[in-house]
């Protein structure tokens, strides 16, 4: 039976020769992930089951949402995680000073390989599909049960083939690709389906682009997003990954629910207007809208390549005096690499503030909360009402180049307006 990439991975982890969309299966998992917010309820379920952890190497715990701790409650949640790690000899725990935003950190640390089944008590766990894994977010209850059993259940999703053609133009990035796709199909356009990316256009996508695209598959309602492995992905894993893996490729006659074609060379920088990621339009259509804050970072766009785009623009002109600009490297390694490349100095001299790696403002946590009536351009992944602060604030989603240009101009702007 011909299968898609997602179906093949799920079948192997269920011990079956084949699976089909809609089928209910029980799968072995390779990684169970939780963070400082989602771990406490997962731990409650784990202790209720009354078993030891299924594998001390396959549970990954990252305090990144309200960490470094912003208040007493967040400190208590982090302490609970820390104590669990010690009591259960969890190998992959990343303390403050060694941590990063989880979905930047895990691939960087070589913990993700092709063909795995990865679940995380965080919706953007789908990021890891950029490395050919089946990765998806689950509730804390399911994560807690999996920490004890090493298994979880799934309904096999049908797959949408997303064929990418051509090459990305200058200043167009993976964020523009995924926002354009969401703009086409809507936030429920891939509901409980797999987005399988393919086509010769993939060759023009860096790993940072692919992580961004896979990360926001959930914003289209998808169960997961997944890319095939090529030389670019192999080069990324070389020197990072220490465990064996098996690449998975879709069968040439696999059955897809639908096919969407995107010509990369026709894309332009875009922005998603409040209050849904599907409200996508070209930057040129909203370039008179004044803003108050810019956030560059998050699990979506906190990698070195993202910071490089922002630095190229902020090296030309400083931040507008009416705009607060917050730069958040995705991990300590990204921070170090950006420091060595001179990006951090560029940001500070331009009038931006640089934060320790944290999810922070993305979920309205801290490090950049909006007041009523304020507008922010952000490289994060969601712009729901109240996502970054007051319910009467507005978040405009964009890639790093647009965010940096907007910081300079004091309004939503494209990079060409700064780099004339």
Image (tube, rainbow, N blue to C red):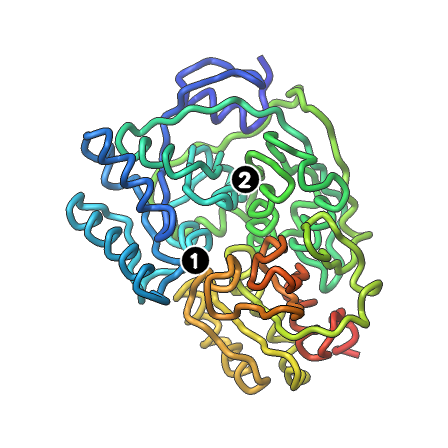
Q: Is residue 173 left or right of residue 210?
A: right
Q: Quadrant of residue 4?
A: top right
Eye-nearest disc, 2 or 1: 1
Foreground residue, 23 or 166?
23
Q: Where's residue 175, x and y in %?
A: 65, 55
Q: How many numbered dots are placed on residues in this image?
A: 2
Asked whether disc 2 touches disc 1, contact meaning CB atoms under 8 Å apart, the reply is: no
User: Toward the viewer: 284 or 14?
Assistant: 284
In front here: 253 or 90? 90
**Residue 128 percent coordinates (x, y):** 49, 43
Q: Residue at x 53, y 22 (%)?
A: 156
* Residue neighbourhood size for the residue with mark 1, other residues' Cα within 10 Å, grouped as few (<14), some (14–19), many (≥20): many
The residue positioned 61% from the left and 24% from the top of the image is 158
Residue 21 rendering spot, x and y as whole percentages:
58, 19
Q: Is residue 335 left or right of residue 288?
A: left
Please state the horizontal and vertical placement of residue 29, each as a whole percent of the image.
Answer: 37, 31
Residue at point 26%, 35% (across, down): 46
Separation of marks 2 and 1 at Cα, in angstroms: 24 Å
Q: Quadrant of the N terminus?
A: top right
Residue at which label 2 appears: 229
The residue lying furthest to the right in this view is 285
Q: Which mark is residue 411?
A: none
Residue at 56%, 34% (x, y): give it. 223
Neighbour class for label 2 at 10 Å: few (<14), some, many (≥20)? some
Q: Is residue 11 left or right of residue 377?
A: left
Disc 1 secondary structure class: loop
Tag 2, which secondary structure? loop
Does label 2 or label 1 sit earlier along the sequence? 1
The residue at which mark 1 appears reads as 101
Query: Farthest residue toward the left?
Result: 87
Q: Which image quarter holds the C terminus?
A: bottom right
């Amino acid at each position: 039976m011909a299968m898609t990439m997602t179906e093949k991975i799920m079948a192997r982890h269920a011990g079956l020769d084949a699976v089909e969309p809609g089928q209910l299966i029980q799968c072995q998992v390779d990684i169970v992930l939780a963070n400082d917010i989602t771990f406490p309820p997962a731990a409650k379920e784990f202790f209720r089951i009354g078993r030891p952890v299924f594998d001390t190497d396959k549970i990954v715990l990252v305090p990144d949402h309200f960490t470094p701790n912003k208040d007493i409650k967040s400190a208590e949640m982090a302490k609970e995680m820390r104590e669990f790690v010690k009591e259960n000899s969890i190998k992959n725990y990343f303390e403050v000073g060694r941590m990063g935003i989880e979905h930047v950190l895990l691939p960087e640390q070589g913990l993700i390989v092709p063909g795995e089944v990865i679940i995380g008590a965080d919706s953007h766990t789908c990021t890891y599909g950029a490395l050919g894994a089946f990765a998806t977010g689950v509730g804390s209850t399911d994560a807690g049960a999996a920490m004890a059993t090493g298994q979880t259940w799934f309904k096999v999703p049908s797959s949408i083939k997303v064929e990418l053609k051509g090459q990305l133009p200058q200043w167009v990035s993976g964020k523009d690709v995924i926002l354009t796709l969401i703009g086409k199909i809507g936030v429920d356009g891939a509901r409980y389906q797999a987005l399988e990316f393919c086509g010769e256009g993939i060759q023009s996508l860096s790993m940072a682009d692919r992580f961004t695209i896979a990360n926001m598959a959930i914003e289209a309602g998808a169960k997961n997003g997944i890319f095939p492995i090529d030389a670019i992905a192999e080069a990324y894993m070389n020197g990072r990954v220490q465990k064996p893996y098996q690449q998975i490729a879709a069968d040439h006659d696999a059955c897809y629910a639908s096919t969407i074609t995107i010509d990369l060379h026709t894309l332009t920088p875009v922005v998603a207007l409040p209050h849904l990621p599907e409200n996508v339009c070209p930057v040129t259509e909203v370039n008179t809208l004044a803003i108050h804050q810019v956030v560059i970072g998050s699990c979506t766009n906190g990698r070195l390549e993202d910071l490089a785009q922002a630095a190229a623009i902020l090296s030309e002109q400083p931040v507008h005096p009416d705009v607060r600009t917050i730069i958040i490297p995705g991990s300590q390694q990204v921070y170090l690499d950006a420091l060595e490349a001179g990006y951090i100095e560029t940001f500070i001299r331009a009038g931006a503030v640089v934060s320790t790696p944290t999810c922070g403002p993305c979920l309205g946590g801290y490090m950049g909360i909006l007041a009523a009536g304020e507008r922010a351009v952000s490289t994060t992944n969601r712009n729901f009402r109240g996502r970054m602060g007051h319910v009467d604030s507005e978040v405009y989603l964009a890639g790093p180049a647009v965010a940096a240009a907007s910081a300079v101009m004091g309004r939503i702007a494209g990079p060409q307006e700064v780099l004339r």
